[in-house]
Image (cartoon, grey):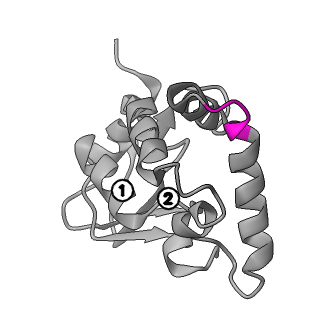
Amino acid sequence: MESRIKTLANKLDFTGIKVVSFDIFDTALIRKVLKPTDIFQVVADEIGIEGFKNARIAAEKNARKLQPGREDIAYSDIYSLISKEIDPQKELDVEERYLTVNKECYELYKSVPSECKVIFTSDMYLPHEFVSKILHKYGYYYHELYISGSVGKSS
């Protein structure tokens, strides 16, 4: 039985379409947790620091306050406010383990003709290189990738 998305993908008409854009988080990729901040609790459990989740949430909030001229912050802005004893790579490792492909979105992605320019975007603080690596891991390739935290803009 064909999925609804595959049926939709087969019906799409790309005539005259030059650019197709996909959102990344909760669209092309999904996390195997209920809420994105649940990742911070996994990190806390793995590093053995009770209260890390709340500290991590507070660091992000404070980083945003400290960057009033920027529309979005970078991952390094957040971790500059967290103890130097906590390796920022740990959160990235947990993110990678908990991210997976959204199979329905991937079906749509595969239906895009090769002559279309494919762009992926996200309003996210995670590093550009990290997001690119995860997209490639799940078979998403693109012409351009825009991550708001990398450019300091959210729109």
Three-letter amino acid code at disc 2?
Answer: Leu
| Disc 2 + disc 1, Cβ < 8 Å | yes
Label 2 crowd (10 A; few <14 / some 14-19 / many >=20): many
Label 1 crowd (10 A; few <14 / some 14-19 / many >=20): few
The label number, if any, that marks residue 98 in the structure image? none
State left or right for residue 109 relative to residue 43. left
**What is the secondary structure assignment of the residue under circle 2?**
loop
Task: Say if residue 64 shows up in the picture.
Answer: yes
Q: Is residue 68 magenta?
A: no
**Pick the front one: 139 or 115:** 139
Q: Is residue 52 magenta?
A: yes
Three-letter amino acid code at disc 1?
Answer: Phe
Indicate the quadrant where residue 8 lies: top left
Task: Say if residue 111 shows up in the picture.
Answer: no
State left or right for residue 141 relative to residue 27. left
Q: Which residue is mark 1?
A: 130
The residue that appears at 41% across and 50% down in the rendered structure is 89
Indicate the quadrant where residue 113 lies: bottom left
Residue 140 screen position, x and y as percent: 28, 50
Residue lying furthest front in this view?
85
Q: Which residue is mark 2?
A: 126
**Pick the front one: 30 or 129:** 129
Residue 145 screen position, x and y as percent: 38, 68
Residue 148 screen position, x and y as percent: 55, 71
Vertical relation: 79 (above or below) 35: below
- Residue range of the region highlighted in magenta in the rendering: 49-53
Q: Quadrant of the N terminus?
A: top left
**What is the secondary structure assignment of the residue under circle 1?**
helix
Residue lying furthest top in this view?
1
The residue that appears at 64% across and 76% down in the rendered structure is 155
Q: Main secondary structure of the magenta part?
A: loop
CA–CA distance between discs 2 and 1? 7 Å
